[in-house]
């Protein structure tokens, strides 16, 4: 398959909602997270390649040019909602879009990893910009070959290509992701995580799984309806707000 493109002429005709307007596209940028200054809700930034892609907890996010979906979206959540929950909303939208592209089920490893076959295919972050807006960033590994995936990743990585052996067109995947995020975000604004809990709970990767938190072994209980993660560590129930959870592969 020739290199596909996420240029506006490929993606904009596939958008049917409010999100994705304006659609800011660049072949190369530092990070799509920093390309949306003063843009309104629904604006989307997309790059074919990032030179300073940001992952969660200050980690880098890397992908060879033209192989991944790298996008950020401006949201203006209502004051009564908890902005940190948007990581889960974005993760759920990404999991649903990845499922449709692969025809396989995807899970969410709390708080932000999208998993297929116990490997991470995508990640999401939500960063408050200080003016009431939240910039949600999503990276999906689409057409990377095995040697193009990060060798030092904390969670074993995969791309849609390494999962099913098929090169995937990125434009329809991105358009589906933007539309799905708009739909789920609308439901979240109305009813919070409760309104998305069916989809979230059904895709809870850590539920019942042996895990580690800061070196202590335990079992995942569930993503709670308030977005926190309940775990059983050495027989003691704990509720995590954020942080890093390892798991046995
Ligand atoms: C993670 O799993 O650590 C979150 C990764 C988020 C990466 C995406 S790629 C598009 C957007 N721009 C960035 O710099 N980061 C996010």
Image (tube, grey):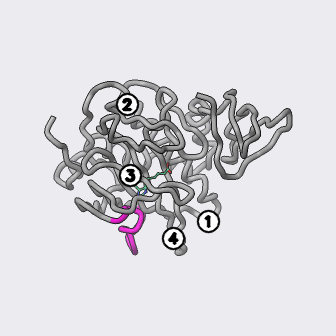
What distance separates the C-alpha of mark 2 from that of mark 1? 32 Å
Residue extending farthest left: 2
**Left or right: 153 in relation to 178:** right
What distance separates the C-alpha of mark 4 from that of mark 1? 14 Å
Q: If you read the primary sequence from the N terminus, does the residue marked by circle 2 or circle 3 appear first?
A: 3
Q: If you read the primary sequence from the N terminus, does the residue marked by circle 4 or circle 3 appear first?
A: 3
For residue 79, the mark is: 1
Task: Give the residue drawn at x 53%, y 55%.
Answer: 56
For residue 100, the mark is: 2
| Cβ atoms at labels 4 and 1 below 8 Å apart | no
Q: If you read the primary sequence from the N terminus, does the residue marked by circle 2 or circle 1 appear first?
A: 1
Circle 4 or circle 3, nearest the eye: 3
Instruction: Give the image quadrant in which the ligand numbered 1 is located.
Output: bottom left
The kind of secondary structure element at disc 1 is: loop
**Left or right: 172 in relation to 120:** left
Residue 23 placed where, x, y %?
28, 60
Crowd class of label 1 (few under 14; some 14 to 19; many from 20; radius 10 Å): few
Circle 2 or circle 3, nearest the eye: 3
Task: Give the residue drawn at x 34%, y 32%.
Answer: 101
Residue that label 4 marks: 129
In the image, is residue 67 above or below residue 166?
below
Give residue 235's quadrant in the image: top right
Residue 124 placed where, x, y %?
48, 50
| Cβ atoms at labels 4 and 3 below 8 Å apart | no
Q: Give the extent of the magenta segment.
A: 30-41
Residue that label 3 marks: 62
Q: Quadrant of the C terminus?
A: top right
In the image, is residue 231 above or below residue 15?
above
**Left or right: 65 in relation to 207:** left
Residue 175 placed where, x, y %?
31, 45
């Amino acid at each position: 398959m020739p290199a596909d493109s996420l240029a506006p002429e490929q993606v904009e005709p596939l958008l049917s909602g409010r999100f994705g307007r304006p659609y800011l596209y660049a072949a190369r940028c530092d990070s799509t997270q920093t390309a949306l200054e003063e843009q309104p809700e629904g604006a989307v930034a997309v790059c074919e390649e990032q030179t300073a892609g940001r992952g969660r907890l200050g980690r880098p996010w890397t992908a060879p040019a033209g192989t991944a979906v790298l996008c950020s979206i401006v949201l203006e959540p209502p004051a009564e909602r908890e902005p940190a929950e948007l990581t889960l909303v974005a993760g759920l939208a990404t999991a649903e879009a990845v499922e449709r592209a692969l025809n396989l089920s995807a899970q969410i490893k709390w708080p932000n990893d999208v998993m297929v076959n116990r490997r991470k295919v995508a990640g999401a972050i939500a960063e408050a910009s200080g003016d009431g807006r939240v910039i949600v960033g999503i990276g999906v590994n689409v057409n990377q070959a095995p040697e193009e995936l990060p060798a030092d990743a904390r969670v074993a990585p995969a791309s849609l290509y390494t999962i099913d052996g098929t090169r995937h067109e990125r434009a329809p995947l991105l358009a589906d992701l933007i539309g799905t995020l708009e739909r789920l975000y609308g439901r979240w604004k109305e009813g919070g995580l409760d309104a998305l809990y069916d989809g979230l709970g059904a895709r809870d990767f850590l539920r019942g799984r042996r895990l580690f938190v800061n070196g202590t072994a335990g079992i995942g209980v569930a993503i709670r309806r308030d977005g926190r993660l309940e775990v059983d560590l050495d027989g003691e129930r704990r509720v995590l707000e954020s942080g890093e959870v390892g798991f046995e592969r």
